Amino acid sequence: MNRKNFLLILSFILTLLIAVGCNKTQKPNDIKFYYPNGVPALTVAKLTKENPGISEDITIDYEMQESPDTLVSKIMKGEADIAIVPSNLAAQAFNKGIPYKLVGTSVWGSFYITSTEDIKNFKDLKGREIYSIGRGLTPDIVLQYILSNNGLDPNENVEINYLNAESELGPAFIGGKTNLAVLPEPLATNIMMEKGNAKVIFNLNEEWKDITGNANGYPQASLIIKQDLLENNRDFIEKFLKEYKKSQEWALENPERLGDYANDLEISIKKETIIEGQNRMNINFVETKDCKKEYEIFFKVILDFAPEFIGNKLPNEEFYFER
């Protein structure tokens, strides 16, 4: 083989290797989608169970995370390609330089002040003890913000008794230790199904709407996607978002089948709870372009109450993905 032919063959091989390398970057064969157990898992139940072929080039591995700490770890290490996370975690990861973008809201506020009493006004809470969970976290920030905007000082006018987990909060309410508590879904529905005189007295998402003027309330759980996946695989992203929206719409329209899927996927919400409490779970996928204002207000409130919760600053414009 003469030198000229050798160089031509070598050039061809190098070109081929570069093309293959670029192709791998732009079309990953396997991507990881992590999401937490609970209500967010219901938004992706149809996708997880049926696993439709969104792309010939890309396979999605759906993996439910039982522990919040495990989900946080995977996000902070950048291991997820797509994830559903608490909205504050999305901002915190971005502010730490982890290249995720906010794509939309999966679940809006689903915390409720619940009681066996007929309480009509916030002023009736003055001097009362309210059981709750998550000191310094989303339910606490939302509760304190709403109390403050209804004429109550959370540190002076009410006593908030923080328990460690939902597993303590439920028995405390059912057992009569308290008849006034901030309950998340699906716990609120479970308690109202078990304790017939329990009822929602304040829907915190509706109260947030009234105070802020936001159409949807506060964004509780969000869909985030790695920046390189968004930039290099736009056709896949378009198809994926279409399928994800179909999955959550299906969840709202088919509560009984959703209950069966939840059981098959070992999601920790019983079928009867899904059927009874679906409207309170506030599943509604809204893309960032249609709810950016909601996030900006939510993050500003967090910045005032617990800045470290979002990484001590508001995320900039690069955080928000708009197609």
Image (spheres, rainbow, N blue to C red):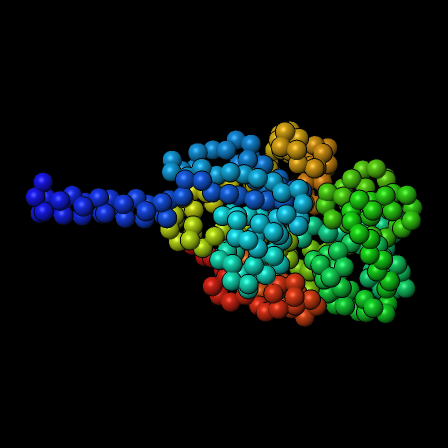
- Out of 165 and 193, give the one closest to the viewer: 165
Q: In the displayed structure, would residue 76 be above or below residue 275?
A: below
At 70% from the left edge and 32% from the top edge, which residue is drawn?
Answer: 271
Percent across and percent down for residue 195 are: 86, 40
Percent across and percent down for residue 146 are: 74, 63
Percent across and percent down for residue 155 are: 83, 68
Decide if residue 142 is on the left or right side of residue 126. left
Percent across and percent down for residue 217 are: 64, 57
Decide if residue 282 is on the left or right side of residue 93. right
Q: In the displayed structure, would residue 143 be above or below residue 266?
A: below
Q: In the displayed structure, would residue 96 be above or below residue 56?
A: below
- Out of 35 and 76, give the one closest to the viewer: 76
Q: Is residue 317 visible?
A: yes
- Out of 71 and 225, give the one closest to the viewer: 71
Decide if residue 93 is on the left or right side of residue 9. right
Q: Is residue 301 visible?
A: no
- Res. 123 image quadrant: bottom right
At 51% from the left edge and 67% from the top edge, which residue is drawn?
Answer: 316
In which quadrant is the C terminus drawn? bottom left
Q: In the displayed structure, would residue 232 be above or below residue 135?
A: above
- Res. 297 image quadrant: bottom right
At 73% from the left edge and 52% from the top edge, which residue is drawn?
Answer: 111
